[in-house]
């Protein structure tokens, strides 16, 4: 049985490693203190603070376990040395909507790094899959809920 590696950019891996350290060194001790304080208030059956702290502890421990698992299978993918300007993992891609001329800029990243607010698309998203392997000046058709939209790739950067 082979271990499924999880692709990351250097920045994405560093961000998750920082989150793990914060959870272990800040959040975990904080929750333990909250549980101890709530215990000191007496009867645990009717102690809402205690139950809330225990629930928070469960979420914190689950996130720590998830991050440790994912980070143990992390593989940094760095395509910045490749000079052919094709869209690959880690690329920043600028798209121009063929209808409106509106430009959008996205980065192709791993699933755990994806964040639409930061314009980071998961490698497995429909948009990213449509872009992979394409080059500047290629026309790309992307299926969206309201149909098919055409974009021109105006820039590929690493």
Image (cartoon, helix red, strand yellow):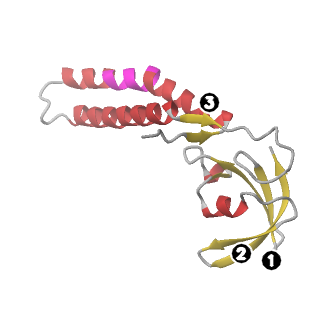
Front in this rendered view, residue 43 or 4:
4
- Quadrant in the picture for residue 40: top left
Looking at the image, is 66 positioned above or below residue 89? above
**Span of residues in magenta:** 25-32
**Percent position (x, y) of residue 139?**
81, 70
Q: Earlier in the sequence, mark 1 or mark 2?
A: 1
**Are there few (<14), some (14-19), or many (20+) residues within 10 Å of tag 1?**
few
Looking at the image, is 144 positioned above or below residue 57? below
- Quadrant in the picture for residue 74: top right
* Secondary structure character of the magenta stretch overall: helix
The answer to whether marks 2 and 3 mark residues whose Cβ atoms lie closer than 8 Å is: no
How many numbered circles does the render carry?
3
Residue 39 belongs to magenta span: no
Circle 3 sits on which residue?
A: 14
Circle 2 sits on which residue?
A: 149
The answer to whether marks 1 and 2 mark residues whose Cβ atoms lie closer than 8 Å is: yes
Circle 1 sits on which residue?
A: 99
């Amino acid at each position: 049985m082979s271990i499924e590696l999880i692709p990351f950019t250097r920045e994405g891996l560093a961000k998750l490693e920082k989150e793990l350290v914060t959870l272990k060194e800040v959040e975990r001790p904080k929750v333990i203190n909250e549980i101890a304080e709530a215990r000191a208030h007496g009867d645990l059956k009717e102690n809402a603070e205690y139950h809330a702290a225990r629930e928070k502890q469960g979420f914190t421990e689950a996130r720590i376990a998830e991050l440790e698992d994912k980070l143990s299978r992390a593989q940094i993918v760095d395509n910045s040395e490749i000079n052919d300007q094709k869209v690959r993992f880690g690329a920043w891609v600028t798209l121009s909507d063929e209808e409106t001329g509106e430009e959008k800029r996205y980065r192709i990243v791993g699933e755990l790094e994806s964040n639409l607010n930061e314009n980071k698309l998961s490698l497995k998203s429909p948009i990213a899959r449509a872009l992979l392997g394409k080059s500047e000046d290629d026309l790309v058709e992307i299926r969206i809920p309201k149909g098919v939209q055409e974009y021109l790739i105006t820039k590929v950067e690493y």
